[in-house]
Image: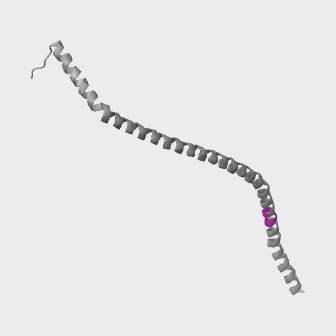
């Protein structure tokens, strides 16, 4: 009889933590369910954000390609301008400078102003 009461007391003593564990597991189940319900809209919104970001990046890559083309054309234009400047200075620059110096000297001679050193 004492052994039977001891066994009942042991079962009752072990039942209390098991009941508390059951309540904890029920709360955990509810928390996981709420997390699942709340995370789905967040993931849908995140998917939309990622899609919009990818579209903007595609547009940005097009703009970057256009800038690269414009830069290449600007390089060609600046090279052509440098070549034209070199051509002008080599063909007309020397004689033009000599003509300007000559006309300056003639003007100074006509006006009678000489610089004395």
Rendered view: 28 above or below 5: above
Residue nearest the viewer, comparing 56 with 28: 56
Q: Which residue is drawn at 78% across and 65% down?
A: 24
Rendering coords of residue 6 (x, y %): 85, 83
Residue appearing at x 41%, y 41% in the figure: 79
Report which quarter residue 15 is drawn in.
bottom right
Q: Residue lying furthest left in this view?
A: 117
Residue farthest top in this picture: 111
Asked if the magenta segment contains residue 95, the reply would be no
Q: Where is residue 106 in the image (x, y as percent from the top left)?
A: 19, 18
Residue closest to the eye, 92 or 44: 92
> Colour mode?
one colour
**Above or below: residue 50 compared with residue 33:** above
- Indicate the quadrant containing the N terminus: top left, top right, bottom left or bottom right: bottom right
For the point 71% across and 51% down, which residue is it? 46
Q: What range is drawn magenta here? A: 24-28
Figure quadrant of residue 27: bottom right
Q: Is residue 62 left or right of residue 72?
A: right
In which quadrant of the rendered view does residue 60 lie? top right
Q: Is residue 67 left or right of residue 20?
A: left
Taking the spot 80% from the left edge, 68% from the top edge, the residue there is 20
Q: Dividing the image into 4 quarters, which one contains the C terminus?
A: top left
Say if 97 sits above or below 33 in the image. above
Q: Where is residue 63 in the image (x, y as percent from the top left)?
A: 58, 43
Vertical position of residue 49 compared to residue 11: above or below: above
Looking at the picture, tell me which residue is in the foreground, 37 or 24. 37
Left or right of 92: which side holds 20? right
């Amino acid at each position: 009889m004492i052994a039977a009461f001891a066994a009942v007391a042991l079962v009752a003593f072990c039942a209390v933590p098991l009941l508390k564990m059951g309540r904890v597991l029920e709360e955990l189940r509810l928390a996981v369910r709420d997390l699942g319900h709340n995370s789905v809209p967040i993931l849908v919104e995140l998917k939309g954000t990622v899609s919009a970001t990818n579209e903007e990046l595609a547009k940005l890559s097009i703009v970057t390609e256009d800038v690269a083309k414009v830069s290449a054309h600007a390089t060609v234009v600046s090279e052509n301008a440098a070549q034209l400047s070199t051509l002008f200075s080599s063909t007309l620059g020397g004689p033009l400078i000599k003509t300007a110096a000559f006309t300056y000297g003639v003007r100074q001679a006509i006006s009678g102003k000489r610089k004395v050193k």
